[in-house]
Image (cartoon, rainbow, N blue to C red):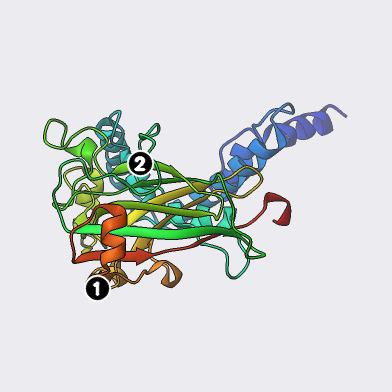
């Protein structure tokens, strides 16, 4: 009886001892009974696949330490306006994958893409047709469009937030003291017909910040850092799934090799060289100017 008890106790304790063959199972088994169900699920899956990756790649101690140092450097590079971890998530395709899992929209609805590391909340509000280019640099661009629901009905009172780089490929927060604060950022609200409009400048391609550990990783992988020319949007309306997306210039050479995998065919816009005098007078532009007509289709939250 005593020997049987000793064997039983040893068997019970075996779940506590580390075992290479059962490492993920043992780690996940340490979670307490009060662990929230969703946290338990997510951590269990990540532990399972992380341990499997170490075994499959036969990761060495030196490589593991190099990875730890890399992640430490990523953290040190983060500032109030630069999020190097978002940049890392972007270049690994994780940001786009999380978005795809989270926003599976029906055909015809506007697709999402990555937020990017340079979004700044509380951009200034402008009236319809307002000019967000505060330094007057770049080729003038007029963007007009409509926001509708899936049934094709126009949506009034929708918030349309936009931001982009300047003609040199920098966001305002990258050039404090050079660009005006909130340059090429603005918030608009659709009118009764769901229409919005703003004046900006033609976007151009630019490199993601490659002076940090993420840039070093891209270089080591033989990948370039150049994002195709685009304008960012966040479109919000109560009762609808918010859209975080871009529109891309069709003539950019980097459309098919975006380092953050953000390009989707449905988001490539037409940039027309316009000489429309009526539009020029309405929006205070000199002819010629670039013109993009871009509509958004929102999906009701109850429809998903």
The answer to which of 261 and 107 lies nearer the viewer is 107
**Looking at the image, can residue 299 be seen?**
yes
Residue, x 44% and y 55% (percent of image)? 245
Number of marks: 2
The answer to which of 77 and 158 lies nearer the viewer is 158
| Circles 2 and 1 in contact, beta carbons < 8 Å | no
- The numbered mark at residue 186 is 2
Q: Residues within 10 Å of mark 1 (few under 14, many from 20)?
A: some
- The numbered mark at residue 290 is none
Q: Quadrant of residue 92?
A: bottom left
Return the x and y of residue 14 as percentages of the image width and height: 67, 36
Return the x and y of residue 236 as percentages of the image width and height: 54, 45
Q: From the image, which quarter does the C terminus lie in?
A: bottom right
Name the residue beneath numbered marker 1. Answer: 251
Residue, x 24% and y 61% (percent of image)? 221
Q: Quadrant of residue 117?
A: top left
Relative to 89, is 98 on the left or the right?
Answer: right
Return the x and y of residue 261 as percentages of the image width and height: 37, 62
Q: From the image, which quarter does the N terminus lie in?
A: top right
- Circle 2 or circle 1, nearest the eye: 2
Residue, x 23% and y 32% (percent of image)? 181
The answer to which of 56 and 210 lies nearer the viewer is 210
**Looking at the image, can residue 258 be seen?**
no
The vertical placement of 32 against 49, above or below, is above
Relative to 271, is 168 on the left or the right?
Answer: left
Callout 2 secondary element: strand
Relative to 173, is 248 on the left or the right?
Answer: right
The answer for how far apart the CA atoms under marks 2 and 1 are is 25 Å
Callout 1 secondary element: loop
Relative to 204, is 198 on the left or the right?
Answer: right
């Amino acid at each position: 009886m005593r020997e049987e008890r000793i064997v039983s106790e040893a068997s019970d304790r075996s779940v506590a001892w580390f075992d290479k063959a059962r490492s993920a199972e043992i780690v996940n088994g340490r979670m307490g009974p009060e662990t929230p169900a969703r946290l338990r699920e997510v951590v269990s899956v990540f532990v399972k696949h992380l341990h499997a990756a170490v075994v499959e790649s036969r990761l060495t101690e030196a490589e593991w330490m190099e990875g730890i140092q890399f992640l430490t450097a990523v953290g040190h590079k983060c500032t109030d306006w630069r999020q190097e971890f978002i940049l890392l998530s972007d270049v690994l395709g994780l940001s786009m994958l999380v978005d795809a899992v989270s926003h599976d929209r029906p055909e015809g609805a506007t697709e999402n893409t990555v937020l990017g590391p340079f979004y700044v909340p509380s951009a200034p509000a402008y009236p319809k047709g307002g000019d967000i280019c505060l330094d007057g640099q770049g080729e003038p661009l007029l963007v007009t469009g409509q926001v509708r629901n899936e049934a094709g009905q126009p949506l009034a009172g929708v918030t349309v937030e936009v931001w982009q780089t300047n003609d040199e490929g920098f966001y305002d927060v990258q050039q404090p003291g050079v660009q005006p604060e909130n340059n090429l950022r603005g918030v608009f609200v659709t009118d009764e017909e769901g229409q919005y409009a703003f004046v900006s400048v033609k976007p151009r391609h630019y490199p993601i910040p490659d002076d940090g550990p993420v840039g070093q990783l891209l270089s080591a992988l033989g990948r370039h850092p150049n994002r195709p020319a685009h304008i960012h949007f966040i479109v919000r309306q109560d009762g609808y799934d918010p859209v975080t997306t871009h529109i891309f210039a069709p003539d950019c050479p980097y459309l098919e090799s975006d380092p953050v995998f953000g390009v989707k065919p449905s988001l490539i816009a037409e940039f027309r060289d316009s000489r429309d005098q009526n539009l020029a007078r309405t929006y205070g532009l000199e002819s010629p100017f670039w013109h993009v007509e871009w509509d958004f289709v929102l999906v009701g939250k109850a429809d998903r």
